[in-house]
Image: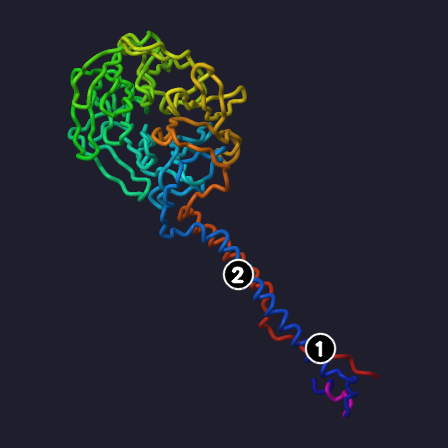
Amino acid sequence: MRDLFATLPDDPPPLPPGYLDTVLTRGRRSIRRQRIGAAALWAAVVLVLAVLVVPGVPLPVRPAGPATQPSLPDRFAGYSMLTSTVTSASPGRAIALYGYGNGETVNMFQSLVVGADGDTYRRVDAMEERNRPSALLAPDGTRVLLGDERGATADLLLVDLTTGKRRSIPLGDRVGVRLLAWSPDGRHVAYSAAPLTRSAEFGTVNFVEPEVARTGTLRLLDLQTGRSTELPAIKPAWTAAFAPDSRRLAVQVGQTAHLVDADGREYGAVPIPRGRELAADVGWSSDGAFLATVPWLSDGPYNGTSGGDTGHGTFLWKAGDVVFVPFPGGGTAPAPVPDVVQLLGWRSAGSVVVAAINAAGHVSLVEVQLGSNSRRTLSRFDTGTTCELGTQGCQMFDLHLATGLLTDLTVRQARRPQRGPWPALVNAVAGVVVLGAAFLLWRRIRPSTQPRRPRMDRPRQ
């Protein structure tokens, strides 16, 4: 090394003019670029976090107050695994409750409510915790009542959609439950209950409703007091509907609809044609003049008539007709309404809202004028290949509308769905991915900490 330095001239050659200024300028420029790059990187990280993670942070959410008129989106949003729950972010009053998803390869079903005042979608997590039992949506869209289809239960669960809170309603002894109808004033719920044998509890997955349809006794629940009144003479009860005044109830046993007042006293009966049953929950016309009947969903051994199947857990696919039955001494019933998958409620005495399906299997909500059978499509459901990670079409089941809101219902243009905060697991994964990418970029652009070797020019000869 000494020999190498000895060959260097005593007087180094002069630097080019402005060399020092050029070196300093380039050094400052390099530092500025590094700082600008780092600032741009962290700005990008903050932006990505704001876009991806912030929507998933469970912040206190206050549902929007009811609009002047309830509304229905002209198109329901597709399936999303990022839909939040009622408990995490209460949605406010709902216009619809339904099951949605597919199980072709793996069960990926959701129990959803859709807002009546905006494009709010939430999963009813209480239903998922109870293995998605059949449920009823309150006529005003503010509550959901559910039982339990895994076996006998000691309570019903009332979920408040405006607060996300739950209320347990004790039933006394453990019984199998089949929810039948909710009164228009929101106070009473009719349900059928029956003891379940031990052998039945180890039978098929959806055994509760058929078992109760065979042996269940009618009960009237007062939601204000939490007390249930048993009507042992009405047995077995498998479908029911309240009158518009909420003080009378039609309950079908065999091929007869028994008419009962709010105190449980029977005051009349209406024969139901063989092969038909009272439309569940919505079978009494809004003017109180007729009962609406639909075809049996399945035949079975119970009472030598229907199998008592309400269609819960069955995809919406089978179209039939709605036939109206007048009360004894009443007027002439309207003509039947054909091509109906499900009767959902009454807009007025002269029009109903039904679920319909086309040749391609797409489900829509349709308003039908009685008599003329003229139809107007209100909304459509997304049944594209968005389920099971985009490999299967989506199916619908157990559809309910907030029947008390249908009279004033309007149709709104669907906007971007508001699904609420993301699940905690999704938040964690998104945060790890973003921060990991930021760290790798930072490592790539940061200045090296290793000292550089000095560059030695070869000595001139």
Residue 23 location (% of width, % of height): 70, 79
Region of the chain picked out in magenta, as a range = 5-10
In the image, is 234 to the left or to the right of 423? left
- According to the picture, the residue beneath numbered tag 2 turns out to be 439
- Marks 1 and 2 sit apart, C-alpha to C-alpha, by 32 Å
User: What main secondary structure does the magenta stretch of the protein show?
Assistant: loop
- According to the picture, the residue beneath numbered tag 1 turns out to be 455
Q: Quadrant of residue 445?
A: bottom right
Give the residue furthest to the right: 461
- Identify whether 103 is placed above or below 340: below
Quarter of the image containing the N terminus? Answer: bottom right
Where disc 1 sits, the SS reads loop
Residue 402 disc label? none
Give the residue furthest to the bottom: 10
How dense is the environment of label 2, judged by Cα within 10 Å: few (below 14), some, or many (20 and up)?
few
Please state which of the two labelled residues, at mark 1 or mark 2, is closer to the viewer.
2
In the image, is 335 to the left or to the right of 361? left
Residue 311 location (% of width, % of height): 36, 21
Residue pictured at 21% horizontal, 33% vertical: 223
Residue pictured at 27% horizontal, 27% vertical: 183
Residue pictured at 33% horizontal, 7% vertical: 274
Residue 187 location (% of width, % of height): 23, 31
Question: What amino acid is found at the position of numbered circle 1 in the picture?
Answer: Arg
Q: Quadrant of residue 326?
A: top left
The mark that comes first in sequence, 1 or 2, is 2
Residue 281 location (% of width, % of height): 31, 23
Is 6 covered by the magenta stretch? yes
Where disc 2 sits, the SS reads helix
> Of residues 223 and 433, which is closer to you in this image?
223
Disc 1 vs disc 2: Cβ atoms closer than 8 Å? no
Is 254 covered by the magenta stretch? no
Quarter of the image containing the C terminus? Answer: bottom right
